Amino acid sequence: MLSQESIEKIDRELAKYPADQRRSAVMGALRIAQTEKGWLATETIEFVANYIGISPVAAYEVATFYNMYDLSPVGKHKITVCTNLPCALSGGYDAAEYLKQKLGIDFGETTSDGKFTLCEGECMGACGDAPVLLVNNHTMCSFMSREAIDKKLAELK
Amino acid sequence: MALEIEIDGKKLTVPDGSTIMDAAHQVGTYIPHFCYHKKLSIAANCRMCLVEVEKAPKPLPACATPVTDGMKVFTHSDLAVKAQKGVMEFLLINHPLDCPICDQGGECQLQDLAVGYGGGDSRYQEEKRSVPEKNMGPLVSAEEMARCIHCTRCVRFTEEIGGFQEIGMAHRGEFSEILPFLGKTVDSEISGNVIDLCPVGALTSKPFRYSARTWELSRRKSVSPHDGLGSNMVLQVKHNRVYRALPLENESINECWLADRDRFSYEALNSDLRLTKPMVKQDGRWIETDWAAALDYVSHGLKDIIARDGADRVAFLASPHSTTEELFALKKLARALGVKNTDYRTRRADFRADALQNGALWLGGDVVELAAAKSVLVIGSTLRKEQPLIAARLRQSVKKGTQLNLLALADDDLRTDTHAKLVVAPAALVNALAQVVAAAAELKQESCQLSLDAVSISDEARRIAASLSEAETGAIVLGNLAQHHPAFSELLLLAQELSRLTGARFGLFGEAANSVGAEVFFRPDQGGLNAAQMLAQPQAAYVLLNTEPDFDAHNPQLAKATLGQAKMVAALTAFRSPELLACADVLLPIAPFTETAGSFINMEGRLQSFNGVVKPLGETRPAWKVLRVLGNLAQANGFDFSSVEEIRAEFAKQLNADRVTGLDNTLKTDAAAVSTAVAAEGLQRLGEVPIYQADALCRRATSLQQTADARAPILGLHPDTLREQQLQAGQTVTVRQGEAEVSLTVGEDATLPSGVARVPTAHPLTASLGAMFGRIDIVRGK
C-alpha cells in the first residue's frame, strides 16, 4: 500500500511516542501517507490505522478534522492562499483573484489538466510576509505579488 | 480523604476524586445531562450539566469538575439555570421538530429536558442543518442523523465497552457527523446498547422502528433465555405481542447492558415458523390435530413402547434453554415412567467426568468475583461470541489490571489485551493445559496429583502458570469449546489440579440460560444413558424438549440417523423445524419463555424467576402444563401442580434463598491419569456453534440472521494449511465427515493453528456433517 520509504518514516513517527500510545502518531502517519499518495483515500486511511493499530474510524476522525488532509484527489500542485486579515490587508485577495484568473478555476477546484488545485487557507503564521501561499502543504511562498505568482507557476509547470 | 461540600445548601462528604455529578447523585439532586454516563468516560461535550460553583468565574460542567474541600455548588441558581437554558437553545437549534414521528418520542432525554429548559419558541430563523443517514447494519438504525446532538456516548461505548471503536465523529464544528467507518457496519455482538445510550432518536432499533409508541407498551420484567449469564430484561408488550427487549439494570449480572441476541431474539417469537397446533404424523403425512388426541398419542405411544421394549429403551432429551420447572417436571415424568435416560448435554462428547463429579458443575463463583479476579484463565472459549457480556466485563477488568490468559483453539480478536495465550489445535488442548499444570507444579515445587505424561513446557504456559500463582485471586474457566471437547474430562481434571496448585477457583461458563438448572435437575439417573449414548445407540422412543437434533447435537449426522430408527419421537417445541418434521412423529407446540412463567438458574447458581408476558400463541401451551397432563395420563402421582410456583415449591429444599444447592466442581481424582499425547491425523475440525445459531430463538430472529456474525459458515484454514492443501481463498470445495459431504467456500484464517479446519456446526449448511471435533477431509477431484 505505502512505499518502504513511507513506512520507515511512519516508524520514525511511532518511535517518538511510548509503545502503548501508538495512536499519537496518527497525524504524522496520515501526513506521510498523503505526501506519498497525493490524497487520503478510504483505503489509505484504513491502512494507516491498521498499521498504527487503531480503529479505522479513529483515523478517519483525525483525517476529517484537519483541513490539510485531502480526502479527495487534488491536482499535482495544491496552492493554498491565505485570506485571513493581515494577508487580506496586504493583497491576499488580489493574489487569490489573480490565481483564479490565471488558472481559470475557483477555490476548491482543480484545473482540467490536473496540475493545480486552488484552496483558501487560514493564517499560516507568516503575516509579515503577506500575502503568503502554501504549495502542497509544505512549501511556504512569501510576498506573492503578481510577478512572484507568475514566476512560481512557471516553476511548478 | 473525604471532602466536605455543599450542594444547593445540603452538606455532604464525598470521597476524594469525586465529581460534582457523583456528589449530586449521592444527595439525590438531579443535574440535567446528555453526554455523561456512569459506565463511560467523561467527555463533557454536551455542556448541559453546567452548574454554578462559588468563587468560580463561570459555570462549570458537573460531570467533569472534581470536588474540592469546602466547595459550594448551586445546581438551580439563576446562573446555573441560565447556562443550562443557553445550552438547550443551542442543542435545539439544529434539532429537527419530528418528535411526533420519532421512535424516541416519549422516552427522549432531549424532549424531557426541553420541557424544563427549552424556550417556548425558537429565535433561530436560519436553515437547520441536514445530515445524511448512515448504514450501521441490520440492528441499529441511523436514518435520522440530524437528530444527533453529538454527545459521543455511542462512540465511547464502542471504544470502551465494545473494545473497538466502530463509530466515530468525523469532520468538525457544525459539520460533525457520527458515522461508522466508510463502507463498514457496526458488527459488535453488543452493538444494540448504543440504542439505549443515545439520548435522542438518532440511533434507534431497526427491527422496532415505527412499530409502536413507547407509551403504548406495557413493561414486564424477564430474564434472557440465551447464554448462562441470565441478563435481566424488560420486555415491552402491546396487543399480546413482544415489541421490544430492553436491559433491566442489575449490576451483579448484566450491569446496564444487553447482548444483541438478548435484545433482538424476540423477533423469532412472532415468526411464521412458530408451531401453533399439535401435529401428528400419519402414514408419513403431517396432520394438525387437537391437544387431547396428540397427548393421547404420546401417552399411549410411550406406554406401549415401555411395555414392549422396556423403560430403559426410552430417552428424554431436553435443551438447557428450557425453564427449571419444565426440566423438573420432565424429570419427574421420566421417573414416574421408570425412564433413567434423561440428559441435556446434547453438544457434549465426553461424559467420563460424570463418574467423578461430586456435584453439579457451575461457574464456581459469582460473575462479579470472576471480574474482580486478578488473573483469569479462559480455556476453550470463543468468549466474545459465547459470553458477550462477560467478555465486555473482563475487558473492563483488564483495564483495571486483571491479567487475562487464554488457552484458545483460535486466536480470535477479543478486543482486549491478553497477558499470555496458547493457541493450539483441538487435539493439543489437553497437552497445552497439562503444560500449564506442570509449570505451576514446578513453580510451587509441588508434585502433581494427577499422573501426567512428561510434557515440554512452553514459555507461554509458564507465564500463565506464574500469572495464576502470583495473583491474589485467580479464576480458571472452561468455555463451551472445552465442554464440547472430546477430552472434556481430562480438561476438567487438569483445571482442578491447576486450581489446587495455584489457589485459583475453577468452573464452567454456562452455555445456556439454564445449564446449571439442567445440570442439577436433568442429568441421567444412576444407570441411565447420557446424551451421547442416547444419540448414538438407537432407542425405541425419544421425547425431545426444545431440542433440535440437527443443531443441538455434538454429531448431528449420527443424531439424525439414530432418531430416524426410533419407533416414536415426540417433540415438545415452539417451532416447526424441517428436521423435526422429518424425524418426529408428534409435535406438541409449547410456549417459549415469554409465554410461560418459569425460572432459569444462571451459571452462578442464581435462580431467577419470571412470568409470562404474553398469552401463548395459537394453541401453544406452557410445557409444564403439557407435562402435567402427560403425568396424569400415565396415572402417575404428584402431577396435580397448578402453577410453576407449586413446581418450584417441590424443589424448594434444593434452593437456598435464590441460589441452588448441590453445586460442586470438584472431581474424585483417585488414580486419575491424564494422557497428554497429541494424536491427530489429517485435518482436524474446529466446530464451534456460531453466536446466532446457539438456540432455537436466535436461529429464527430475522435481524440477527442478517448480521455479520450470522454469515454462512466457511471452511477456515491457516494460510500454511491453504498452501499445503493447494487451495485458494474464495474457492468452493467439498468437505467430508463420515458419510456426509458439504460444499463450502474456503477462507483464509490466520488466527487458526495450522492443520485445523474451522467449520462451524449448528448451521443449516453444515448440519449434515459429523462431530464438532475430529477428522475432516477435503474431497478432491470433483
Image: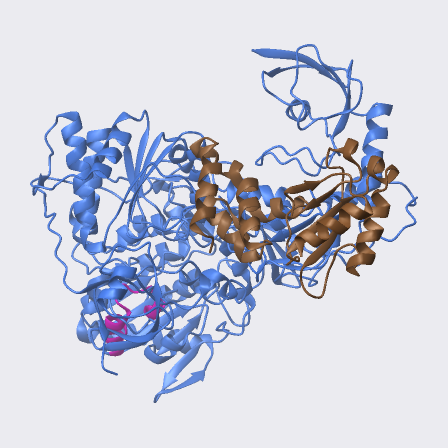
Classify residue B434 by image quadrant: top left
Q: Residue B39: where, in percent of width, then height?
A: 57, 36
Describe residue B703's horizontal placement relative to residue B298 as left or right: right
Q: In which quarter of the image is the C terminus of chain B?
A: bottom left
Residue A122: quarter of image: top right
The reply to whether residue B417 is in sight is: yes
Q: Residue B68 sits in which quadrant?
A: top right
User: What scheme was used to colour the molecule?
Assistant: by chain
In the rendered image of this protein, does residue B110 appear above or below residue B636?
above
Along the horizontal axis of the image, is B19 left or right of B345? Answer: right
On the picture, is B81 further left or further right than B508? Answer: right
Residue plotted at (34% across, 89% down):
B283
Residue sitting nearer the eye, B404 or A39: A39
Residue range (magenta): B548-564
* Percent of width and height locating residue B125: 92, 49
Q: The blue chain is which one?
A: B
Q: Is residue B299 above or below residue B425?
A: below
Give yes or no for residue A115 being in the magenta stretch: no
- The reply, left or right, for residue B34 in relation to residue A4 is right
Residue B558 falls within the magenta-colored stretch: yes
Q: Where is residue B250 in the image (x, y as percent from the top left)?
A: 53, 39
Q: Chain A is drawn in which colour?
A: brown
